[in-house]
């Protein structure tokens, strides 16, 4: 029987408990994940397929219920298992006299987080305090499907009904508190241009960077299936039942023949 290799990634909010993580782009189910669609749906498909907890696969409803912080940690775990320790981004120097492109390496383990708050306290200018819930994947899905306004999003996250229109001050305070509670969703990395030495602050969307990296691996798997199907007339399922190392041997032989 074919065995799957798993790595481990600590689950935020659960001390000494880790996910078992397999690499993406290795199974038929991985080909069915739409990485060109909306990010929350792609992330859910990846997490359900590649994470296990205590030997059990995860259900979609559970993954949708996770906070955006936990979902990002899961996506980082899968990207780490698939792509290795580091992702390399390309950024452009913002100095008006330079503009050179530079590599920005991201060490994925450096973004691991142990905390997973579900709610934080929002202090308003009138002295009152209200609970502010951390958004979940389910919130993201609902907002996308209903095209929810920013004010309504804030209302959805408050622990008590809001009377009247959300004040701009309240919305800004809520945005700032959410960013403080989960800084990885509004990440900005300082780096220095190797050409001119100028300091640059580069905004990084970690979720999008992970998904873009996994698209590359999914595309490679599609290429493998395409080449082997053309040569041997095997089905997708038959091809993906072959261990990746042996698929590579078949592909190497095909490259020799096709040259």
Image: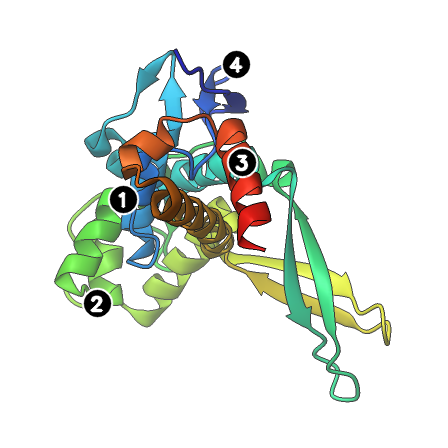
Q: Residue tagged by mark 4?
A: 16
Closer-to-camera residue (94/120): 94
**Residue 75 image-quadrant placement:** top left
Q: Give coordinates of residue 222: x percent, y percent.
A: 39, 48
Q: Is residue 55 above or below residue 65?
A: above
Give percent across and percent down for residue 101: 72, 73
Which of the two labelled residues, at mark 4 and mark 2, occupies the earlier sequence position?
4
Query: What residue sits right under mark 2 in the picture?
Result: 149
Residue positioned 23% across, 27% down in the render: 59
Between tags 4 and 3, which lies in front? 3
Choose mark 1 or mark 3, whichever is in front: 3
Name the quadrant of the N terminus.
top left
Q: Residues within 10 Å of mark 1 (few under 14, many from 20)?
A: few
The mark found on residue 248 in the picture is 3
Element type at marker 1? loop
In this figure, which residue is indicated by the disc labeled 1? Answer: 32
Element at badge 3?
A: helix
State the residue at coordinates (13%, 61%).
146
Q: Label 1, label 3: how many angstroms apart (C-alpha)?
A: 22 Å
With respect to residue 231, does 14 lie above or below?
above
Measure how far apart labels 4 and 2 are at the Cα level: 39 Å
Q: State left or right for residue 113 relative to residue 162.
A: right
């Amino acid at each position: 029987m074919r065995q799957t290799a798993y790595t481990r990634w600590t689950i935020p909010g659960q001390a000494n408990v880790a996910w078992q993580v397999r690499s993406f782009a290795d199974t038929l189910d991985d080909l069915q994940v739409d990485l060109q669609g909306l990010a929350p749906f792609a992330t859910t498909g990846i997490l359900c397929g590649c994470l296990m907890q205590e030997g059990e696969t995860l259900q979609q409803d559970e993954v949708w219920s996770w906070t955006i912080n936990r979902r990002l940690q899961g996506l980082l775990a899968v990207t780490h298992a698939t792509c290795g320790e580091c992702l390399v981004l390309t950024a452009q120097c913002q100095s008006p006299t330079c503009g050179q492109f530079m590599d920005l390496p991201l060490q994925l383990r450096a973004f691991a987080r142990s905390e997973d708050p579900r709610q934080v306290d929002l202090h308003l200018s009138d002295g009152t305090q209200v609970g502010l819930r951390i958004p979940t994947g389910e919130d993201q899905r609902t907002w996308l499907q209903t095209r929810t306004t920013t004010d309504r999003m804030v209302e959805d996250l408050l622990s008590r009904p809001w009377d009247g229109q959300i004040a701009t001050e309240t919305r800004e305070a809520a945005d700032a508190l959410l960013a403080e509670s989960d800084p990885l969703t509004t990440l900005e990395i300082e780096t220095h241009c190797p050409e001119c030495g100028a300091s640059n602050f580069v905004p990084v969307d970690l979720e999008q960077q992970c998904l873009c990296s996994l698209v590359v691996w999914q595309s490679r798997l599609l290429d493998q299936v395409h080449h082997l199907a053309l040569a041997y007339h095997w089905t997708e399922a038959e091809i993906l039942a072959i261990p990746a190392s042996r698929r590579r041997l078949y592909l190497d032989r095909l490259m020799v023949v096709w040259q």
